[in-house]
Amino acid sequence: MVGNVQAIQIDKLIIVGASNTQPPTEAAAAGDVPMGRSADGQVSLLPEDAEMTDEGSLFGGQGGYFHANLNVQGEYTDNLYNVDTDETSTFITTLSPAIWLSLPRKKDIPVIMAPNNTSPGGMALQLKDYEGTDRYQAYALGGLDFVFYSEDDDLNTINGLVEGLFRYNMRGGLSLQIVDRYTRDQEKYDVESVIGVTEDEFDSNIALATADWNITEKLRVKFEYSNFWLDYDEDFNSFQDRADNVFDLYGYFNYSVKTAFFLEGKIVDVQYDSATENDNSQTFIYGGIKWDTTEKVSLLAKAGWQNKEFDNNESGFDRRSDYDGLTIDVQASYKFTEKTSLALDLYRVNEETDSVLASDRTVLGATLGYKQKFTEKVHGLLAFNYEDAEYTQLVEEDRDDTYFSVQPAAQYLFREWLMGEISYQFENRDSTDDLFDYQTNTVFANLKFAL
């Protein structure tokens, strides 16, 4: 995953920033969804029991209009380029300032997006509903990453993101919402990168427009249109440049206040800039459940069928094979006690290709995040990620990559506005094509400031 919004709790404050290099110890699904949540399931920017003690405050953690923070991180890795031979070690320093604002004032982020370049429509997981009851909600966030490599100054770069939301709740149960997110980021190095030249830098933008109507207490419909645009800097990555248009329709039956069943139909039109042989159209049919039984449990789960048809029907090397298969999206969290919580995401989908030798890839992935509060000042975290990617190759050699990572971390609260964290990450990718195998060890240390 790339272009992550990171939300790191510092007692009564939350650090929010844009970083693909931050350790994902606070993240749930695919490293994009923070584990800390408020009682209503929204991502928490304050602890659940915090109150706005200063109604006139414009700034900071007491639910003000404006929030600012800074993350200073150092990391050491023994395999910068994620290759199986001739590994290169390096030290990386990242400075990540960020600011976000909301109107009316909020103590939680109204929306958490999980952009993923290879996912159809640019989203790895379904965007969770914003369920605020204010007549309107406006929100904006901006963050930068200044990244410095000891190995080679030419690798130094600046990444960042800007995102915003506006929602208007009308009388009669109709709500309109617009969300937009622009990302400037870079892929991780691997054996397919041009080592020492670039980190596969790209620009992307995802925009969503939603109409949500509560027809009765039991029935609800939602229509969503989204556009995803992706553009890489270098010509050798131009085969990935594309634009996706997505049309999504939901029908909900509210079984109870906490439980809803739904059906979903989605159409995705994928158009490539130069690799037009990969142009395709996709249809998704889902059945699912949204279940928030208590303050401890949150579940969004759906399963269905995905059909993918390529526009190119030519024979020979350019011939693409259509796809039919199972698709799954599960997002769950459970709070055992006030000090212990667990988050799980599970997904299966046929994605767009990230290899010039493949037409697409089918991905099964899972992310597990565990958080333990030992004392008021000491927290422990553990993140585990797994992904199996089976490529539809255009050459005779098969490719099936199995990736996993594990990352324990410890946090210490120095002040309400200052937290330190250390963590270690082990990554392993095992492929049927040995060229793509690698193991990487990385140690992180950072300080997080919040105002």
Image: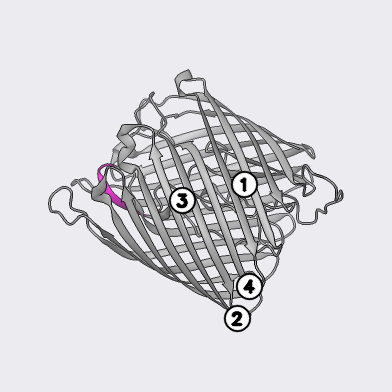
Q: Residue at x 31, y 44 (%)?
A: 273
Residue 42, image x and y in percent?
Answer: 66, 58
Please state which of the two labelled residues, at mark 2 or mark 1, is closer to the viewer: 2
Q: Nearer the N terminus, badge 3 or badge 1? A: 1
Q: CA distance from mark 4 to mark 3?
A: 40 Å
Q: Are marks 4 and 1 in contact (CB under 8 Å)?
A: no
> Mark 2 belongs to which amino acid?
Lys
Looking at the picture, does residue 434 appear above or below residue 311? Answer: above
Q: Nearer the N terminus, badge 2 or badge 4? A: 4
Q: Nearer the N terminus, badge 4 or badge 1? A: 1
Q: Are marks 4 and 3 in contact (CB under 8 Å)?
A: no
The residue beneath circle 2 is 218
Q: Secondary structure at mark 2?
A: loop
- Judged left or right of residue 5, residue 69 is right
Q: CA distance from mark 3 to mark 1?
A: 16 Å
Q: Quadrant of residue 340?
A: bottom right
Looking at the picture, does residue 101 appear above or below residue 87? Answer: below
Q: What's drawn in magenta, residue-wise?
A: 356-362
Where residue 26 is drawn, which disc sits there?
1
Q: Are marks 2 and 4 in contact (CB under 8 Å)?
A: no
